[in-house]
Image (cartoon, rainbow, N blue to C red):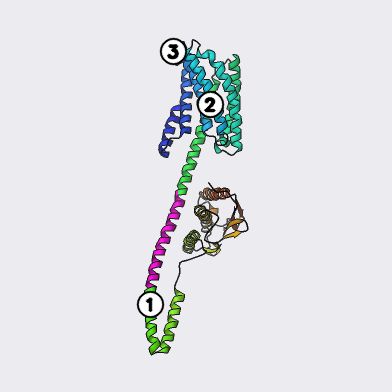
Amino acid sequence: FIAIGTFFYTIYLMYKQKRLEYSLILLSCFALALGFEAVSEDILSGILFEPFVHSFLSHLFIILTSAFIICYYWSRMFYYKKWYGIFCTFQLLIFIGVLLYATFTPAELPELMPIANIASVISTLVTSLACIGEAYKNNRFYVACTPWIVLVAIIHCLIYIQTALGIYQTTINWSTILYIIILIVIISYNLIDHILNTDKDRRQVDFLKIKNDLLEQHYEQLRQHIQEVNTLRLEFVQEMENLQDLMHTDQTKAKNYVEKILEEAKNFEMLCSFCNHQVTNLILARYQKLAAKRNIQITFQADLPEELPINDDDLAQLLIHALEHSFRETHAIENPLYRKIYLSIHEQEEHFVICCEHSAHYDTNLFSRGITEELDDQERFDLMMMKDVADRYTGTLTQEKDTFIDRITVQLSRNYPNPV
């Protein structure tokens, strides 16, 4: 049932992703081979097939199970994939040689299994070392699964040694049970990872919607502003003509008319601008309007040039997640007089610094009453996304908070390698 479930789970994931995922295909093949191995050693299999066929199938699926699991481990590696892949190739060649020799010569497969078992003994040791190395390099899959993989590999190693020496005698197929355990661990990891990625994708879509809203608002404001400028240009030409006429007829009226034009020019509202960087202007203008609607006192200090040492998308992600975090907690303060946000963006020597500080009043705000259970989850997500950007720019993310104030500081190095 686990094998069949894994097979359909693989089909479902590849259908959702709209592409072939060879690691999932290998996992499915491993699960099916493990299922057939368990069935081939069942009493019913011994009744349905001749002893020779039953023995051959049993040992065949033992080899296939071992082959598919090492191939799956290889598919999940990043740092030692090349070297482990070379070892996997040698082991697979040994397995293929054993199967071909048993097929085309009088020798039977059970007689050749000690050769395959010796290869498997070496495989358990190499696999354990490779998995530990991947976990040390922070490969998420191996960080989660390596303890189980190493434990199962050690027990398998002992079983293979005893089998190769011909002293392994038991009525329980521990090898299959151990493989089932590791299969359950891998499936559990993949399910949890899929759920987390789905939630992350949903939040990323929300983030992109905010960016899209910013652009739409910007283009609408720009269109209206261009229309206003065109109208003013026509009015200015007309007023200059009127002024020219007054200069010849009435100097006093001309003077008053000039003062009127100056007053109108002073009252003309330009597009909101906080700095020379357009993306930053769009984001800050949006949250300034939002702050006015929610009765939040917000202050921006952005001393930025037109060109920044950070990608616009990454900058937008940092600012939006920082401000969403601040707005969510500040808006929960009951008294609007205490709702304050301060955002500072500046370049400091070899660093690009973003500091977002807001009043919190955690002891008295709405969240303190348990009205919502999503605050912690939303805060973790905002900080996780900001930390991800900071890491790509060889930077740091720090959070300082007490009962009344919450401050997030992101410091990015100007001498970072190109982010990927």
Q: Secondary structure at mark 3?
A: helix
The reply to whether the magenta stretch includes residue 208 is yes
Find residue 241 and report its image quarter: bottom left
The magenta stretch is 205-232
Q: Which residue is mark 1?
A: 237
Asked whether the beta carbons under mark 3 and mark 1 sit within 8 Å of each other, the answer is no
Q: Type of residue at label 1?
A: Val
Spatial CA span between label 3 and label 2: 36 Å
In the rendered image, residue 231, in percent from the top left (x then y), is placed at: 37, 72
Q: Which residue is mark 2?
A: 89
Residue drawn at the location 45% of the way across and 79% of the way down: 262
In the rendered image, residue 405, in percent from the top left (x then y), is placed at: 60, 58
The crowding category of the residue bearing disc 3, from other C-alpha atoms within 10 Å (few below 14, some 14 to 19, many at least 20), is few
Of labels 2 and 1, earlier in sequence is: 2
The crowding category of the residue bearing disc 1, from other C-alpha atoms within 10 Å (few below 14, some 14 to 19, many at least 20), is few
In the rendered image, residue 381, in percent from the top left (x then y), is placed at: 52, 48
**Closer to the camera: disc 3 or disc 2?**
2
* Image height of 147 relative to 37, above or below: below
Nearer to us in this view, 141 or 393: 393
